[in-house]
Image: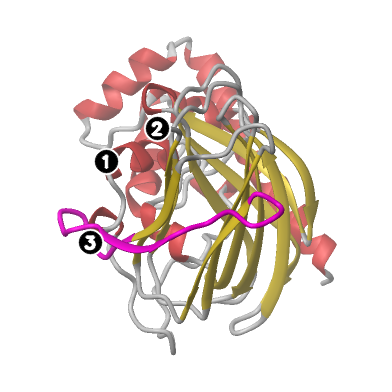
């Protein structure tokens, strides 16, 4: 079976499950809100938005709790046992594989307000541990700040290593100041945009990308993509949460020639609640660019902060 067959088969199973679920819901005459209530009564809660994603084929149940909810759905919707469960495609491997780069740090020790990221990920039927897979051996993020002092875009380059066979996708999280409209993917290389979700109250965005080809355990691949932020990104810092040790991390910011910050420095915070370590003060070069390069970085929050006055 070639790579395109694998991808088509996976998408087909997801579509088949979604179509069957949608038909069962229509025949039951129950609104999603009532199905949500009945699932909660059976202690297998699923949000209304997730039910909508499932029936539209945007994602499929994979976690143990989600699969239990599908079994409960079969009873609620008057379906035979396993009528819906049998249509779910193979579960993506989620086990934590041994890594030569050390352990995975729990996301709530690194992310500020981790519940916001968790809510956004749930809309993809993903969990925070999925952010650490595949392993990002190297990350290079190049940001651009416009003449208004707003974060305008980012270009991302990642060297990925698969933790399991048939690795087909990865997730990128972006926290925004405001979300008047979704961010826009401007280009890709080695991958393609698949789905976008957001936790709107916190302006936390989650973008899923599919790889151009599936990776087996230990295989590496380089991916690149660009993203344009929506208007109004007024934060005066950028940061990246690193959940696993890596080989290198590069954060770069280019400021518009018409507006330079008065101060700019790099920082590192190893854990939430621990002191923020100021790493270095920057002087802009001839291209109005600063770089924060860390070799063999440990998990934690890495970032660049600036001030206009």
Q: In this view, does 156 lie to the left or right of 179?
A: right
How far across and down, in percent of the image, does residue 275 sit?
Answer: 17, 58
Q: Looking at the image, which residue is at 57% across and 39% down? A: 260
Compared to residue 270, the image places residue 36 above or below, namely above
Residue 276 sits in quarter: bottom left
Q: Residues within 10 Å of mark 3 (few under 14, many from 20)?
A: some
Judged by depth in the image, the label closer to the viewer, 1 or 3, is 3
The residue that mark 1 highlights is: 113
Q: Residues within 10 Å of mark 1 (few under 14, many from 20)?
A: few
CA separation, marks 2 and 1?
Answer: 32 Å
Q: Looking at the image, which residue is at 52% across and 81% down? A: 247
Q: Is residue 279 left or right of residue 290?
A: left
Compared to residue 248, the image places residue 278 above or below, namely above
Q: Is 287 within the magenta? A: yes
The residue that mark 3 highlights is: 271
Residue 45 sits in quarter: top left
Q: Which label's residue is closer to the chain start, 1 or 3?
A: 1
Judged by depth in the image, the label closer to the viewer, 2 or 1, is 1
Disc ID at residue 215 = none
The one nearer the camera, 244 or 302, is 302
Q: How crowded is mark 2: few (under 14 residues within 10 Å), some or many (20 or more)?
A: many
* Magenta-tinted stretch: 268-288
Compared to residue 66, the image places residue 43 above or below, namely above
The residue that mark 2 highlights is: 73
How far across and down, in percent of the image, does residue 83 sit?
Answer: 52, 41
Q: How many marks on residues?
A: 3
If the image is split into quadrants, where does the N terminus sit? bottom right
Q: Is 3 within the magenta? A: no
| Cβ–Cβ under 8 Å for marks 2 and 1 | no
Q: Is residue 221 left or right of residue 51?
A: right
CA separation, marks 2 and 3?
Answer: 40 Å
């Amino acid at each position: 079976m070639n790579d395109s067959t694998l991808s088509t088969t996976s998408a087909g199973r997801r579509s088949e499950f979604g179509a069957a679920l949608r038909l069962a819901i229509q025949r039951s005459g129950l609104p999603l809100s009532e199905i949500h209530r009945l699932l909660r009564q059976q202690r297998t809660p699923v949000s209304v938005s997730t039910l909508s994603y499932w029936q539209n084929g945007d994602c499929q149940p994979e976690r143990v709790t989600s699969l239990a909810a599908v079994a409960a759905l079969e009873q609620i919707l008057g379906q035979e046992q396993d009528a819906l469960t049998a249509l779910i495609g193979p579960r993506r491997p989620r086990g934590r594989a041994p890594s030569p780069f050390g352990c995975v740090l729990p996301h709530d020790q690194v992310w500020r307000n981790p519940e916001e990221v968790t809510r956004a990920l749930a809309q993809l039927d993903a969990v925070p541990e999925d952010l650490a897979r595949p392993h990002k051996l190297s990350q290079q993020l190049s940001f651009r700040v416009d003449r208004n002092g707003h974060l305008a875009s980012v270009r991302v380059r990642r060297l990925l290593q698969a933790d399991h066979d048939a690795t087909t996708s990865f997730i990128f999280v972006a926290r925004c100041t405001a979300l008047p409209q979704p961010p826009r993917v401007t280009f890709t290389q080695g991958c393609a945009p698949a789905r976008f979700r957001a936790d709107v109250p916190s302006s936390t965005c989650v973008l899923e990308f599919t790889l151009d080809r599936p990776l087996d355990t230990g295989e590496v691949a380089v991916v690149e993509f660009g993203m344009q932020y929506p208007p109004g990104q007024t934060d005066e810092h950028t940061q990246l949460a690193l959940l696993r040790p890596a080989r290198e991390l590069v954060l770069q910011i280019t400021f518009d020639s018409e507006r330079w910050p008065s101060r700019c420095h790099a920082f590192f915070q190893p854990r939430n609640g621990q002191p923020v370590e100021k790493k270095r003060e920057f002087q802009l070069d001839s291209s109005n660019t600063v770089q924060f390069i860390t070799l063999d970085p440990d998990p934690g929050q890495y970032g660049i902060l600036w001030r206009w006055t």
